[in-house]
Amino acid sequence: MSIYKFLFAIFSLNLFIFIFFKPIGIEATKLEPENIPQIAFQNFTLFDIGSDNIVETAINGAKGMIFRNGKYQINDVNIKYQNSKYIENLKSRYAYYNQGIIEAIGDVLYNRSDGSIIKTNNMSYDVSSKSFYISKDFLFISKGLKVKGRKLFIDRNTGQIKAFNIDAVFQ
């Protein structure tokens, strides 16, 4: 068998496979540009310095990502905020920021310098309206008051608090 006949046989076999065989149903994974982080940080601290050159907010995280659509994701987050009245601290496994909403998910712990504590698994905070919303079970502890319930809404502008299915104990 000459080399030409051998090369022709290989070429014919490849052409036959290319024309008559179809893929086995494995589809290529297509990544959307919105799902690919543009910037990623590990073990970082971000400071927000106010107009009076005082640190107002400090954000610590194990991993942080910024996406093209403006969404932020932080793993193992600790947010510390200081205003004229209180020092506030929020810890959770994950935090997402998108279009003015911060959503903390997983072992959420919010505490304030006056001793107020909120424990839950999911908490949302609307930056523009300054309101908290918890859609699941929560525990609120403050100055001898212990409140367990489901669904909590706190409007920081008006001081209005709404809660559902609560059991309260005053000690």
Image: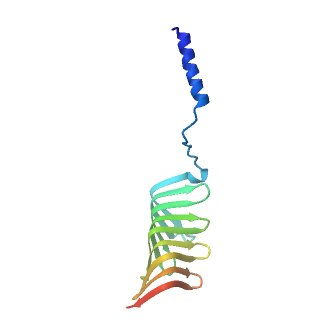
| In the image, residue 164 above or below residue 80 | below
Question: Percent position (x, y) of residue 119?
Answer: 43, 76
Q: How is the image coloured?
A: rainbow
Q: Is residue 115 left or right of residue 85?
A: left
Residue at left 56%, top 46%? 29
Quarter assignment of residue 5: top right
The extreme bottom residue here reads: 170
Quarter assignment of residue 108: bottom left
| In the image, residue 13 above or below residue 21 | above
Residue at left 57%, top 48%? 31
Residue 143 visible in image = no
87 vs 111, nearest the viewer: 111
Question: Percent position (x, y) of residue 148?
Answer: 44, 83
19 vs 143, nearest the viewer: 19
The extreme left residue here reads: 171
Question: Percent position (x, y) of residue 161?
Answer: 54, 85
Total residue callouts: 0
The extreme front residue here reads: 20
55 vs 113, nearest the viewer: 113
The extreme top residue here reads: 2
Question: Percent position (x, y) of residue 19?
Answer: 61, 29
Residue at left 47%, top 86%? 166
Q: Is residue 26 left or right of residue 91?
A: right
165 vs 168, nearest the viewer: 165
Quick one: quadrant of the C terminus? bottom left
Residue 2 visible in image = yes
